[in-house]
Amino acid sequence: MIAQKDRYLDGKVCLVTGATSGIGKETARVLAHQGGTVILVGRNPEKTVATVEELKREADTPNIEYLLADLSSQDEIRRLAEAFKNRHNRLDVLVNNAGGYFLWRQESVDGIEMSFALNHLGYFLLTNLLLDVIKASAPARIINVSSGSHLRATLDFDELQERRGFSGMNAYGQSKLANVLFTYELARRLDGTGVTVNALHPGFVATNMGSNIGWIVRAFRPLMNLWAISVEEGAETVIYLATSPEVEGITGKYFFRCKPVSSSAYSYDEAAAKQLWAVSEEMTGMSQIPNP
Ligand SMILES: NC(=O)c1ccc[n+]([C@@H]2O[C@H](COP(=O)([O-])OP(=O)(O)OC[C@H]3O[C@@H](n4cnc5c(N)ncnc54)[C@H](OP(=O)(O)O)[C@@H]3O)[C@@H](O)[C@H]2O)c1
């Protein structure tokens, strides 16, 4: 049982995407232990309900809920945001974490390359749709789980969807670079609102990441995991950014092992961040809605 003094999230509402597995599930577990009302976002009803039941038993709290959405679908993200707002009038912590690695080119239901649709536009659209309630809850925090894979990436705005020659590694790196550019641009737009937004690299973590690719990854997963850190360690920086008083007011940074570190040189390109924002608005239809 967690000591009363460590219940940093008493009275606070937290939404965690990708909360049925890996880093997101561990994050949801600890946020619930720290007293938060935690809403898990999952895409598979049975798995999501089972995760909620497991975490409720462990944290000995009824304050764990769930919402369902395939976050590669813009319609489902819109329904998710609406369902959240129907139930809650505050959001203190948003953790954008759901993500995937796609070895072959796939398209979302909206006809967008899947890594970009899920890993970047999923974060962009959900955050923007929830921004009014997040701002009304200030001081509030947004945390974007990125990856060190962004370090080798650049954005080719003519080829964001990788139609000519697809590489899973490029598409993933590009989407994770987009997480960092989005974080920095959103931090600039939220200046003075009391809402902070930070990105992070969790490290190489022993999760289910990549198991959708097929039997090769599933077969080699135990071997790969010999080099990986545990899920508990992988979630540490997310939880730190969600709860620690040390990062109160800190915004627009990229963290690794609970410390702000430099992201790639390209990620600091403000013109690229603005262009990405405009393209993302266009691709999600958010240009109809006033900017934060
Ligand atoms: N593991 C690493 O080494 C590593 C390194 C750097 C960054 N990251 C980042 O960490 C984040 C979490 O990944 P993880 O390693 O914890 O992987 P994971 O164990 O595979 O968890 C991914 C989570 O995202 C959910 N998800 C996947 N596609 C979805 C969709 N279309 N709609 C809704 N939810 C979806 C999964 O749901 P299901 O349970 O239904 O599959 C799962 O809950 C990702 O953003 C990833 O890029 C991971």
Image (cartoon, rainbow, N blue to C red):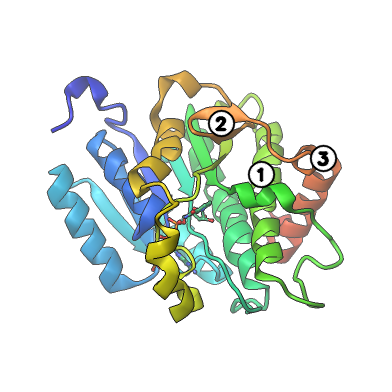
Distance from the alpha carbon under mark 2 to that under mark 3: 20 Å
Describe the element under mark 1 as helix, strand or loop: helix
The amino acid beneath tag 2 is Thr
Of callouts 1 and 2, the N-terminal one? 1
Please determine whether, in this image, residue 170 is positioned above or below residue 278: below
Query: Mark 3 — residue?
Result: 269
The amino acid beneath tag 1 is Val
- Out of 60 and 77, give the one closest to the viewer: 60
At label 2, counting other C-alpha atoms closer than 10 Å, the crowd grade (few under 14, some 14-19, many 20 or more) is many
Residue 145 visible? The answer is yes
- Out of 207 and 23, give the one closest to the viewer: 207
The residue that appears at 80% across and 43% down in the rendered structure is 266
Residue 208 visible? The answer is no
User: Where is residue 230 drawn, in percent x and y?
Assistant: 36, 47
For discs 2 and 3, the disc positioned in front in the rendered view:
3
Are circles 1 and 3 on residues that touch, CB within 8 Å?
A: no
Query: Mark 1 — residue?
Result: 180
